[in-house]
Amino acid sequence: MLVANKPGIGAIAHAKAHGIPTEVVPGSVLKSTPEQLLKMLHHHRIDFIALAGFLAMVPAEVTREFSGRMVNIHPALLPDYGGKGMYGDHVHRAVLSDGRTETGITIHYVNEVYDDGEIIFQTKTPIDPGETLESLKAKIQKLEHANYPKVIESCLKKLKS
């Protein structure tokens, strides 16, 4: 199933086109009634969660219940450039403005703190002289698409063994 915190995102249309159930749960609902999300996840018999572009804080009740079974992807090499408000272009701009020579992606388990869970996988890419926000975003997206599915599959295999 796909759970989004914002209506109208492209992932919802993609999921529906493939017969995948979808739900929109705004961040305000997550904060006030996390049990609603847990009930939905139990109803759909969800046993693993992969976050991707989910910008709301996942309630502690959910992260605790899915400890070791919830992953997220971050567009930088954590622990640098992580935490509240550090997502997407915010991360890329910070990396570029700091004059870094490399960046990358981090795939990590999710806990109660933004971008703080145990790191599962990281890979790097150089930042070329004259790198732009758009060119860096493209590099990072390529790394994400190449690696996130493989890491998710690996995590699922570990759970089944």
Image (tube, rainbow, N blue to C red):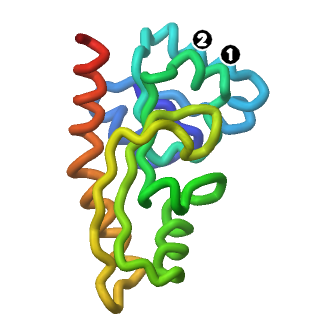
* Residue 58 x/y as whole percent: 61, 33
Q: Is residue 129 depicted above or below 139 in this figure? A: below
- Numbered mark located on residue 35 in the image: 1
Q: Quadrant of residue 77?
A: bottom left
Q: Where is residue 73 in the image (x, y as percent from the top left)?
A: 41, 46
Residue 150: quarter of image: top left
Q: What residue type is labelled 2?
A: Lys
**124 sits left or right of 47 in the view:** left
User: Which residue appears at 26% of the width and 51% of the height?
Assistant: 145
User: Is the residue 89 above or below the residue 86 in the image?
Assistant: below
Q: Which residue lies furthest to the right in this view?
A: 32
Q: Which residue is drawn at 30% across and 27% down?
A: 155
Q: Mark 2 points at which residue?
A: 39
Residue 36: image location, x then y, percent:
66, 17
Disc 1 vs disc 2: Cβ atoms closer than 8 Å?
yes
What amino acid type is highlighted by mark number 1?
A: Glu
Near mark 2 (Cα within 10 A), the count class, few <14, some 14-19 or many ≥20, is few
Name the residue nearer the viewer: 74 or 138. 74
Residue at the spot x=66%, y=37% of the render?
26
